[in-house]
Amino acid sequence: SCSGVPAYIQGSTGIVSATFSDATSGPTAIGATVNVDTTSLGLNSIAIGASDAAGNPGSQTCTYRVLPDESKPIITPRIEGTSLAQGWYTGPVVVSFVVDDPDSPVLSTEGCETVTVGADAVSQVAAVCRATSYGGTAVQPITVSRDSVAPVITCLDLRFVQGTAGKATANAT
């Protein structure tokens, strides 16, 4: 006999169990657990076979349900580099991604490789990670601003009269 109608998320690992009995010669095994295909949505079935001690074969069809995966993959960006001001990096910036889906396997990724931004730029799209599972496709772009050059300070023409207060100004670019 089968152990109820278990339900699994599409693409996840599924197992179905059955127990065996035989009133006369006894079964050669007490039960079995088999892995099942969880890619097809809806009600599915699998036949589980056994024999009794006399060699008579038997089979039981067990049913299981596959539910849709309604969650897209989770993309977590990692940004490493020296940042002295909010959102600005002053040297090489390394962008990487961790992709996970707790409900079903990640079927494909694109653009999720580690990238190093080595040139100065304002709001440069460093990488766009796309990940697909049975729950759909998630997209995570990462924008980086990098400025590794110190400002140029130019002093303006200074004129002071000896013995009076004065002030100096400068322009920074």
Image: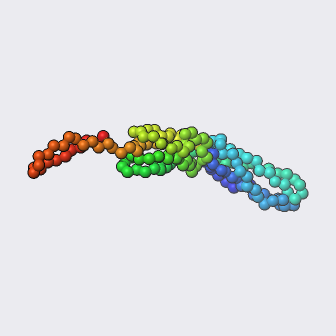
Question: Residue reaching furthest right?
Answer: 54
Is residue 53 shown to the viewer in this render?
A: yes
Q: Residue 42 or 117: which is nearer the viewer?
A: 117
Query: Residue 171: x, y in percent?
Result: 25, 41
Query: Residue 133: x, y in percent?
Result: 58, 43
Question: 2 left or right of 67?
Answer: right
Residue appearing at x 27%, y 42% in the figure: 154
Q: How many marks?
A: 0
Is residue 71 shown to the viewer in this render?
A: no
Colouring method of the image = rainbow
Question: 79 left or right of 109?
Answer: left
| Quadrant location, the C terminus | top left
Q: Quadrant of residue 152?
A: top left
| Quadrant location, the N terminus | bottom right
Residue appearing at x 61%, y 42% in the figure: 107
Query: Residue 79: x, y in percent?
Result: 47, 49
Establish if 26 lies above or below 48: below
Query: Residue 8: x, y in percent?
Result: 62, 49
Residue appearing at x 36%, y 48% in the figure: 86
Q: Residue 17 or 88: which is nearer the viewer?
A: 88
Q: Residue 99 or 8: which is nearer the viewer?
A: 99
Residue appearing at x 51%, y 44% in the figure: 116
Question: Residue reaching furthest left?
Answer: 163
Question: 8 left or right of 171?
Answer: right
Question: 5 left or right of 28?
Answer: left
